[in-house]
């Protein structure tokens, strides 16, 4: 504990304060406690003497002591973070170092950080496993998820990404189609394609994950996202499939533009329109393609 100045001692001189701060390494907090002065008064007097103080909360610069890194640390980080896609917390536990050290070394070694919530962070089911388990084994999305150690939503999302026919979720309809090839359906919708065409957003066919289809997301402006969401009636997930922009980013940008998001659950205006258009007698024909249970289409 820093010793306090006895009550009978006079106030410290400028030279005394400067000596204790610069030579003895005492902080403004230490000086304030020792001399029973307000901390602001200590800082003010030090600055009046031309002493540069760090910003509040940063603290004094401490002499660094850094143990040398293992020779193969960069190789380990590339393997764990880039190849195995472990989090910095998991890597820290694996290597026995702090999470902050992991993040610092990623920056120092020039390893590009993943953005939390982006589609690059998401898990998916390998396409060959998904097709094999459904086409040959006839498993549902829930059964496939349990078998591959994933979740129903990931299975359905991967199926949509690949352009597979997915059985519609929700209560069964009395008429109309029971499954949807979502990306093709979005590109076939007149209201959706009108907005995409107006803003020069081209079609990217299904056949891979969002990250594979869009190595770089489409630079769509906020008002374009709002048009797709409000006027075309598609969900944030649908917009992601058409632009490569992560759903979390889309939702945040819509809210910042003053758009009130629909409640989760139920069917989007787009899906209602799609089913209505295909409920006419000549559109009622059984599909010969395989389908997964549940659309997972979101709001």
Image (cartoon, grey):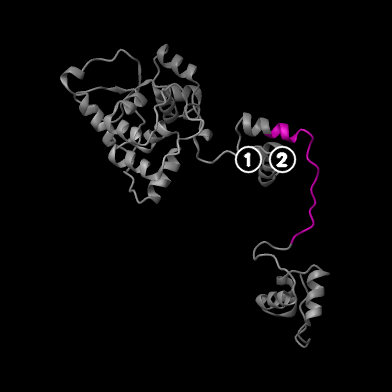
Q: Does residue 97 appear anywhere in the picture?
A: yes
Q: Is residue 75 magenta?
A: yes
Residue at mark 1: 88
CA distance separating discs 2 and 1: 12 Å
Q: Does residue 33 appear anywhere in the picture?
A: no
The local crowd at label 2, few if under 14, some if 14 to 19, many if 20 or more residues have their Cα within 10 Å, is few
Considering the numbered disc 2 on the image, is that residue within a helix, a strand or a loop?
A: loop
Point out residue 152 in the picture as x, y percentages from the top left corner: 42, 28
| First reached walking from the N terminus: tag 2 or tag 1 | 1
Q: Depth check: 107 or 146 in front? A: 107
State the predominant SS element of the stretch in magenta.
Answer: loop
Is 100 located above or below residue 293 in the figure? below
Q: Could you tell whether 154 is left or right of 283 in the image? A: right
Point out residue 176 in the picture as x, y percentages from the top left corner: 21, 23
Residue at mark 2: 96
Q: Which residues are magenta?
A: 61-77
Is 288 located above or below residue 261 in the figure? above
Q: Could you tell whether 56 is left or right of 129 in the image? A: right
In percent of the image, x 47 and y 27: which residue is there? 213
Q: Mark 2 near mark 1, Cβ–Cβ under 8 Å?
A: no
């Amino acid at each position: 504990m820093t010793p306090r100045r006895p009550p009978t001692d006079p106030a410290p001189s400028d030279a005394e304060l400067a000596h204790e701060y610069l030579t003895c390494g005492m902080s403004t907090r230490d000086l304030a406690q020792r001399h029973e002065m307000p901390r602001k008064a200590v800082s003010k007097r030090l600055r009046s003497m031309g002493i540069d103080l760090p910003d509040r909360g940063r603290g004094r610069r401490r002499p660094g002591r850094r143990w040398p890194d293992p020779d193969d640390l960069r190789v380990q980080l590339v393997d764990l973070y880039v190849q195995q896609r472990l989090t910095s917390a998991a890597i820290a536990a694996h290597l026995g170092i702090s999470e902050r050290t992991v993040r610092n070394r990623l920056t120092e070694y020039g390893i590009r950080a993943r953005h939390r919530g982006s589609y690059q962070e998401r898990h998916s089911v390998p396409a060959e496993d998904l097709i094999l388990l459904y086409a040959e084994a006839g498993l549902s999305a829930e059964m496939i998820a349990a078998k591959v150690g994933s979740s129903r939503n990931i299975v359905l999302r991967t199926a949509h990404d690949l352009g597979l026919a997915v059985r519609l979720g929700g209560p069964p309809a009395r008429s109309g189609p029971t499954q949807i090839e979502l990306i093709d359906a979005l590109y076939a919708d007149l209201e959706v394609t009108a907005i995409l065409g107006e803003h020069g957003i081209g079609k990217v066919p299904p056949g891979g994950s969002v990250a594979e289809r869009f190595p770089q997301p489409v630079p769509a402006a906020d008002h374009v996202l709002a048009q797709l969401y409000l006027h075309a009636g598609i969900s944030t997930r649908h917009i992601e499939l058409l632009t490569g922009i992560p759903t979390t980013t889309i939702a945040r940008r819509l809210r910042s533009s003053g758009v009130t998001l629909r409640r989760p659950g139920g069917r989007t205006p787009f899906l209602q329109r799609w089913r209505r258009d295909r409920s006419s007698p000549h559109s009622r024909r059984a599909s010969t393609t395989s389908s997964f249970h549940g659309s997972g289409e979101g709001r």
